[in-house]
């Protein structure tokens, strides 16, 4: 199993529009072979001192996949290409962290 944290930095004021498009994508991704978890998350307000906020113009996509091959197939899926085209004007940049459980 692998974990993916995708930090999506958006152009100012575009988060709501981005999340509308993302919501359309989620059922398609959940149906993909090897998808264990896939969803968007935004900051929650806490008083925990170590918290680092993403900010109002960012979304974290939290993913779990059976393996790297499943992730690669996901990234190449036609619905992902269509989604990227729809959100291209909203997104400033995407940073990926791809992790495996520590042993």
Image (cartoon, helix red, strand yellow):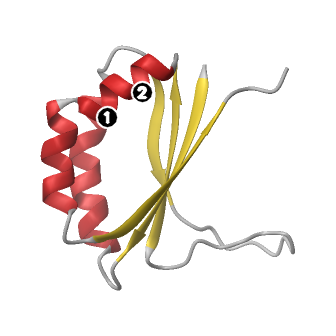
- Name the foreground residue: 49 vs 76: 76
Q: Which quadrant of the figure contains the C terminus?
A: top right
Q: CA distance from mark 1 to mark 2?
A: 6 Å
Residue at horizontal 48%, vertical 79%? Answer: 56
Q: Which label was assigned to residue 71?
A: 2
Circle 2: is it few (<14), some (14-19), or many (20+) Cα within 10 Å? many
Give the image location of residue 95, x and y in percent. Answer: 49, 57
Element at label 2: helix
Q: Are marks 1 and 2 in contact (CB under 8 Å)?
A: yes
Q: Which quadrant of the figure contains the N terminus?
A: top right
Q: From what the image shows, is residue 52 above or below residue 76?
A: below
Element at label 1: helix
Q: From what the image shows, is residue 48 above or below residue 11?
A: above
Give the image location of residue 93, x and y in percent. Answer: 39, 66
Does residue 103 appear left or right of residue 91 in this picture?
A: right
Residue 70, by quadrant, is top left
Q: Which label was assigned to residue 94?
A: none
- Name the foreground residue: 54 vs 91: 91
Does residue 30 appear left or right of residue 88 in this picture?
A: right
Q: Which residue is mark 1?
A: 75
Residue 92, by quadrant, is bottom left
- Name the foreground residue: 20 vs 86: 86
Does residue 25 appear left or right of residue 66 in this picture?
A: left
Residue at horizontal 44%, vertical 43%? Answer: 39
Does residue 25 appear left or right of residue 2 in this picture?
A: left
């Amino acid at each position: 199993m692998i974990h993916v944290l995708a930090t999506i930095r958006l152009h100012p004021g575009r988060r709501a529009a981005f999340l509308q498009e993302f919501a359309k994508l989620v059922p398609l991704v959940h149906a993909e072979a090897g998808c264990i978890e896939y969803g968007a998350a935004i900051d929650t307000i806490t008083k925990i001192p170590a918290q680092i906020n993403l900010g109002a113009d960012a979304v974290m996509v939290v993913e779990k996949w059976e393996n790297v091959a499943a992730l690669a197939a996901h990234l190449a899926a036609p619905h992902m290409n269509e989604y990227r085209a729809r959100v291209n004007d909203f997104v400033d940049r995407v940073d990926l962290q791809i992790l495996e459980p520590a042993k």
